[in-house]
Amino acid sequence: MSLRVAGRCAGAFFLLAFVAYGVGSALPGPPAGAALVALNSALVAAIGALAFRALRPARPGAAWGYLVARGAEAFLLAAGLVLRDSAGAGAADIAYQAAMLSLGLGSVPFCLALARQRWLPRWLAGWGAAGYALLAAGAAAELSGIRVGLAPAAPGGLFELVFGVLLLARGFAPATGGRPGPTGGAPSSAAGAGDTRVWRAARAAGVGLLLMAILAGLANFGVVQRLAAADAAGATTGLPLSHQRALVLAVVALLAVACLDVLVAWALRAFLADAGRAVALLAAWCRTGYAVVFAVAITHLVAAAGLLRDGGTERIDAGVRTRIADFEEVWSVGLLVFGVHLLLIGWLAWRSAAVPTWVAALVAVAGAGYLADSIGALVPAAYPVQVATATFVGEVVLMGWLLGFAARRRPGRRADRDAGRARQAQLA
C-alpha cells in the first residue's frame, strides 16, 4: 500500500469515526448505539496503524507514540461502553476522559512530525498540536474534578475534520509537492545506522522502565494498596473526596504504565533482535499481551472510581472493594505472561554480546519469580510468600544497565571520541 493510498484510507477513517462516535453516543443505547461506538474504536485503531506504517521509517518515536495512544483511545472508548452498563455513568466518563487524554498526548508529537516531514503545512500542524494539547489539558482537568465542558475539545475536533478531508484528497504526501522532510539525521552508513538504532532502543527501554517504576509505585502502593488495606482492616476507615480523586489519578498513572509496557516491549525487541529475532518478537508480543490484560484489570479500578463518584459516599462500599479485588486477580493472571516475557528477555540477554551475563541471570530470576507467584495464586493451596518481592531486583538492574549503556554508547559522544583518537594519531 502506497503512502497516498494509506493516507486516503486514514482520512476516510477520520471522517467515519467522527460520525460513528457522534451518532453512536447520541443514540439511547444498544444495539445501534453500541455498534457505532464499537465501530469508532475499530476505526481509531486502524488510523493509528496506518499512520504508524507511514511515519515509522522517518519518525519512529512519534509513530510509536501515536500508535499506542490511538490503541489506548480505542480500548478506553470501548471499555466506557461496557462500564456504562456495569458501573454507571461516572465510570464511563472517566474512561472517556482518559481516552481523550491519551489521544491528546499522543497526537501532539504526531502533528509536529507531520510538519517536519512536510506532509502538513506548518500552520495546520501547529493548529493540530495546539488543539490536541488543549484537549489533553481539558481531559486532565476533568479527571481532576474540575469541570470545563466540551470547549477544550472543539479546536482538536475541527482539526480532525480538516485533516481527514486533506488526507482523503491527497494521502500522506508533502504539502508543497516536494520531497519529504529529513529523516532525523541518522548516519548514512549501515554500521552507523545500526549503532544508532541500538542506542535509541536502549535509551527508550531504559527511560520507559524508569517512568513505569515511578508511576506504578505511586499509583499501586500509594493509592490502590492503601484502599485494599482499609478493606482488610474492616472497611471502617472513611474515604474522603481527596481519596476518590487520588484513585482516578492512580487509574491514569496505571494506564500510562500499560502504554509504556507496549513501548518498552518493542524497544527491547529492537535492542535484542540480533540475539534471536524470532524469540525477541515472541517476547515483545508476550509483554504486549500482558499490557492488554493489565489494561483490562485497570478497568475494574475505573469502575471503582466511577462508583465512588456516582455514589457520593465517603465509605468503601462492597462494590468498590469487589472491584479492587477483581483488579488484583486479573493483574495476577497477566503477571504469568509477564514472567514468560522476562524469561525470554533473560535468554536473549544471555546470548547478546552487549549484555553482561549477570544481568541476564537476574532478569531470568525475576521472570521465574513472577511465574511462581502467579501459578501459586491460581492453585487451590496458594502459598502466602510472594517470591517476586525479592526477585524483582532483576528488573531494576536491567533498567539501570540500559540507562548506563545508553549514556556510554551515545552516537555523538562515540563520534567525538573517535575523532579525538584520529587527531592524536595524526599528531603522533
Image (cartoon, helix red, strand yellow):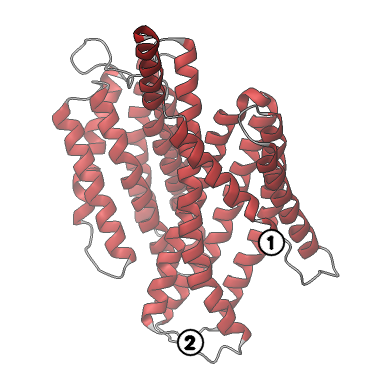
Q: Secondary structure at mark 1?
A: helix
The structure residue drawn at horizontal position 68% and vertical position 40%, both measured from the top left corner, is 360
**Which mark is in front, 1 or 2?**
1
Distance between the alpha carbons at the discs numbered 1 and 2: 34 Å
* Quadrant of the drawing holding the C terminus: top left
Q: Is residue 154 left or right of residue 303?
A: left
Asked if residue 399 can be seen in this view, the reply is: yes
Q: Secondary structure at mark 2?
A: loop
Query: Which residue is denoted by mark 2 in the rendering?
Result: 315
Q: Residues within 10 Å of mark 1 (few under 14, many from 20)?
A: few
Q: Amino acid at mark 2?
A: Arg
Q: Is residue 425 left or right of residue 282?
A: left
Q: Residue 277 lies in what quarter of the image? A: top right
Q: Position of residue 402 (x, y in %)?
A: 53, 40
The structure residue drawn at horizontal position 46% and vertical position 65%, both measured from the top left corner, is 218
Q: Amino acid at mark 1?
A: Ala
* Quadrant of the drawing holding the N terminus: top left
Task: Judge by depth and name the residue closer to the eye, 8 or 417.
Answer: 417
Compared to 196, does 22 lie above or below?
Answer: below
Task: Judge by depth and name the residue closer to the eye, 290 or 156.
Answer: 290
Q: Give the mark, 1 or 2, whose residue is nearer the N terminus.
A: 2
Mark sitting on residue 13: none
Compared to 420, does 31 lie above or below?
Answer: below
